[in-house]
Amino acid sequence: MINNSWSCPASEGCVTRAELETIVQNTQAAGIFVEVSAGNAGPGCSTVADAPSIYTDSFSTGAIDITNTLAGFSSRGPSTFYTPNILKPNISAPGVNVRSTTRTSDTSYGNMSGTSMAGPHVAGVVALLWSAHPGLVRNIALTKTILQNSANAAVVLTPPQTCGGTLIHPDTKQLVRLRAR
């Protein structure tokens, strides 16, 4: 399992945005789950725009708050990297006002927001899922299916938003929250 909280914009050499796709594909083919934070470029449509969050093989994560509301900063799909476009992010998780360590000292904590705060929730769920069901280890496709099919689809987005022909509202499976168990 890899938790990615970075992007590769053109300024860093990803001019075609395809530079990392083979790496993500090979990592997944090796049985390593690739979770990628979707980005903080919302609320506009097609803002999941940087590698590696745009790829079919990466499992990208958006951010919600404690009330199940999609964070205004959370990037939204569709990803326009492929034709036809693909739905992204794959899932959303708590990413607003999340308690985390800070870099000021070895014992300092603070509240932070971003899809980088949401991604570790997904990584943790994958680790727990694989620990509880060892037969799922390295079965990336089934793991993704379980995550998406067992997620809570009741994400609040006011007002509803249409992106790439997909209405984003609580009845869609595009933006979902991990269920508390």
Image: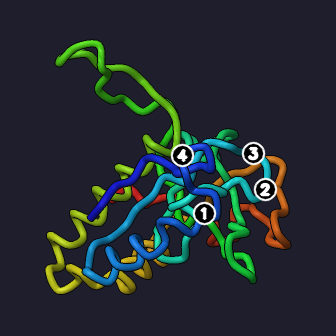
SS of the residue at dot 4?
Answer: helix
Per the model, the C-alpha gap separating discs 2 and 3 is 7 Å
Q: At label 1, which amino acid type do we have?
A: Arg
Per the model, the C-alpha gap separating discs 2 and 4 is 23 Å
Residue nearest the observer in this picture, 172 or 67: 172
Q: Which residue is mark 2?
A: 45
- As drawn, is 107 to the left or to the right of 83? left
Per the model, the C-alpha gap separating discs 2 and 1 is 18 Å
Q: Is 138 situated above or below 164?
A: below
Do labels 4 and 3 touch, CB within 8 Å?
no
User: Image quadrant for the N terminus?
Assistant: bottom left
Q: Position of residue 44 (x, y in %)?
A: 79, 49
Per the model, the C-alpha gap separating discs 4 and 1 is 11 Å
Q: Which residue is mark 4?
A: 12
SS of the residue at dot 3?
Answer: loop
- As drawn, is 29 to the left or to the right of 84? left
Residue 43 is marked as 3
Name the colouring of the figure: rainbow
Q: Earlier in the sequence, mark 2 or mark 1?
A: 1
SS of the residue at dot 1?
Answer: loop
Residue nearest the observer in this picture, 157 or 89: 89
Q: Which residue is mark 1?
A: 17
Q: Residue at x 55, y 40 (%)?
A: 65
Query: Where, by quadrant of the figure, is residue 86 drawn?
Result: bottom right
Q: Residue at x 21, y 64 (%)?
A: 128
